[in-house]
Image (tube, rainbow, N blue to C red):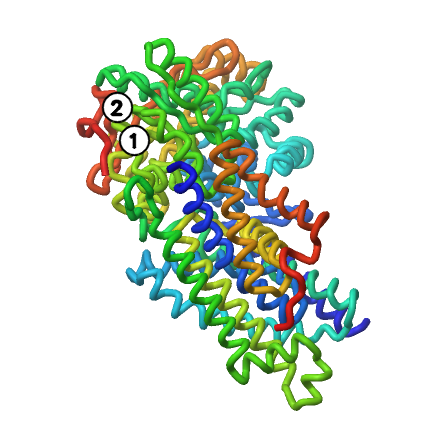
Amino acid sequence: MVVVQLTINGLLLGGLYLLMAQGMNLIFGVMRVLNLAHGAFLVGAGLLVFRLHDAYGINPLVAILIVAPAFFAIGALVQRLLLERIEASGLEGELLTLMLTYGLSYIVINISLKAFGAQYLSVPYLQSALQIGSVTIDESLLVAAAVAIVLSIGLQAWLTSTPSGKRLRATSQSRIGAMSCGVDTRRMRVLAFGVGSALAAAAGALIIVVRPLDPQISGDFTVLAFVVVALGGLGDYVGAAIGGAILGAVESFGGYYLGANTQAALPYIVMLLIMLLRPQGLRPAVAR
Amino acid sequence: MKRHYRIAALVTASVALVCSVAAGASTAGTRSGSVHRLVFGATSWNGASSDPIKVGLSISQTCPSAATGEYQLKGYKLFVSQLNKRGGWLGRPVQLVVYDDQSNAGTAVLLYQKLITQDHVDLLVGPYSSGITQAALAIPEKYHMVMLDPGAAAPNIYSGVQWNFQAIDSADRYLLPVADICRAHHWKKLGIFVNSTSPFTVAAANALKARATAEHLEVVFVQGYPGTTSDFSSTVLAAKSKGADCIAGATNTPDSIGLVREINRSGLKPKLLAESIGPVEATFLTSLGSLVNGVLGNTQWWPTLKTRGNKQFVLAYAKAFGRQHPDYHAALGYSAFQVLDTAIKKVGSLDQTKLRDTIRRLTVRTVAGTFKVDANGLQIGFKTYMMQWQNGRGVLVFPPKVAEKKIQLPYSH
C-alpha cells in the first residue's frame, strides 16, 4: 500500500512539474529561447493571486483568468520591446538572450519583493485530501495535475489544429520558410512568449496553493522547469509530461526510502544523468 | 556600440536601478559607496552635547529574512526614539547607523567591519538570525566591542566568545515544553521533524530529544529535511507508521506551513502538534486559514505578559508604527537596548571593557523578561512560552501561570 501511495504522490507531483515547465517548453520549442525569468513570472503571478485572495476573496482558480491574461501581455511586451531587438543569431544571439532574460528575472524578483514583501505566502485553499481506502490523494496536487493535463492537451490541440498554432509551429521549424509563406514571424514570437508567460502565471496561481512562495526562490522554479524540459526533450510537450512523471516518482520514492535530504538533490542528479547519457532527452526529436 | 549591446546595457542598468530601489531604506539616509546607509535618531537636539552616540548594526531589510529583521529593527528604533526624548545617553543624542545585510552572512561581516573601521560607531547591536550572527560576531570579538544579540538563539555560536551576549532565550529550550506537556498528559511517543540546515532548529530538536529521553518518552522518529523542502509527502508518510502521540517540528516559517498541511492531508492524527518558528508569524494564519487551529508554537514574548513596561511598549509600538502589533523580535530588540541603557548608566561611560564586565553581571527586568547571562554569555534569564491558535486567534497557553487561555488538546482536524 505504501508503494501505491508513493506512486500516486509521484504522479501528482509530476503533474505539478509539468505545469511548471509548460511555459518554458513552449517558448524554447518555438524560439529556442531559454527564458531565465520563467520562475520569476511564476512566483510573481502566484503572489498576485495571494493578494487577490487575501484582499478580495477571489478564488485562486478564478484568479487564473486574471493573472494569465495579465502575464500574457507582459510576456508579449517583453518579446516585442526587448527580445525582438536582439539581432544577433546563433551562439551570440542565444547568449544575449540568456543575459537579457537573466537580468529580467532580477527586475521581476525585485518588483515582487517591493510589491509583496519578502515573507513566504500561501493561499489556504484545497488543503484536504481525498481518501480512497487507505490511500490519500492531495486535493491541491490533483487539481494542479488536472489543470496541467488540460493545458497540455489544449496547447497540443492549438498547435496542431488551429491556423495560428500551425503558423507558430512553422515559425519554430523554419523562420525563412514561414516568412516565405506569408507568416508574420515576429507576431508569432510575440504570441509564443505571451502564451508561455501566461502558462507560467497559471502555474504560479496553482503552486501558491500547494506551497508557500517568496520572490527569492524564483530561481528554484526556473531550474526545476528546465530539468523537466531537458528530461523530456527540449520543446517536446509529451516528453515533458513523461519527464515530469519520472521526476515526481523519483522524488517520491527517493524521499521515502532515502530521506528528505537526498530527495532535495534528486532532480539535479537526474538532470546530470540525462545530460551525460541522453542529452537529446527521453524522446527522440519528433516532427511537430 | 551595436544596438543589441545597447539593449543589454540598458537591461543591466535597469536591474541595478530596481535593486537599489528595492533595497532602499524607508527613512532618510546617506550614500556610502555602493551601500545604502540608514541613519536614524533625533533630528533636533537641545541637550548639552550634540555629538551623537552612534550605535551600529546590520539587519535584514531585503531578501528572505527581511520581514523578521524589520520587526527587530523597529524594536531598536522605538527605544532610541524614546531615549532621545529623555535626554539620550551621557547628555548626548543616540543615533542608529543601519545597513542592510540582505539576509546574507558574508555581507553582514563586511558591514560590521565597516561600522567599526569607517563609521567609527561607539556601540553595536546584533543582526537577525543565528546564521548571520554566527558570522558577524567575529568582528566585535576582533575589535573588542560589546554586542548584544537579540536575533541569535542558537547556543553553539557563542562558544568561546567574550564580547557577545545572547539577548534571546536559547534555541535548545524552544521545544522543551512539548516534552513536559506530553508527560503531563501521559502520552508516551514523540516524533520530531527537524529542518536540518539551520543551526537553530537542529539545536532545538536535539535538546527536545534529550529532554524526552530524560522524561521517559519514546522518540519514535526524528525526520530531517533540508530547509528548501516544499514537498513533505514522503517525509510525513515515512513517519506515519511510527505511531507518534505527539509531534514536534523544529521548523522555520515556510516548512512550518508545509508540514502542517501535509500532516493534515496524510491522515496523521497526533494528539499534539507543535512547531518552533512559524506558528507565531502572521503569515502562518494567512497561509493556512483554519488549519492553524490547535497548532502550538514557540514564542519568546507575548503582549499580555506582565513584564516591566510591557503594556507601555505595546501601546508605544502601535503609536510609532501605524497601529501595527509588535512580535517577539521587536520586543527582544527593544529589550537589548534596555540592557545597554542599564549598563551605560552603571558604568557612566562607553568604555567597552567596563560595559562588557557590567553586562556579564547584570540582571535587568525588560519588556521581554529578566535578562541575565552566564559566564559564557548565554542567556539564562529569559523564558520560553508556547502559544496556540484557537478559533483563528493566537493565545498564550504555556506555562499555565501566565496563560491567557487553557491549552486545547488533543489536536485534531
Examine the rendered structure and indicate whether residue A44 appears above or below residue B258.
below
Which sits earlier in the primary sequence, circle 1 or circle 2?
1
At horizontal 18% and vertical 27% (from top left) the residue drawn is B406
Image x and y of residue B292, in percent: 28, 40
Image x and y of residue A94, in percent: 73, 65
Residue type marked 2: Phe
Which residue position holds label 2? B398
Asked whether residue B82 is in view, the answer is: no
Image x and y of residue A286, in percent: 64, 68
Circle 2 SS class: strand
Pick the quarter of the image with the N terminus of chain A.
top left
Which residue position holds label 1? B296
At horizontal 50% and vertical 47% (from top left) the residue drawn is A248
Q: Which of marks 1 and 2 is in front?
A: 1
Mark 1 and mark 2: Cα distance apart in space: 10 Å
At horizontal 58% and vertical 28% (from top left) the residue drawn is B122
Q: Nearer the viewer, residue A144 or A219?
A: A144
Q: Nearer the viewer, residue B45 or A201?
A: A201
At horizontal 59% and vertical 77% (from top left) the residue drawn is A190
Q: Label 2 near label 1: C-beta < 8 Å?
A: yes
Residue type marked 1: Leu
Examine the rendered structure and indicate whether residue B96 appears above or below residue A87.
above
Circle 1 Cα neighbour tier, 10 Å, few/some/many (<14 / 14–19 / ≥20)? many
Q: Nearer the viewer, residue A143 or B325?
A: A143
Q: Which chain carries label 2?
A: B
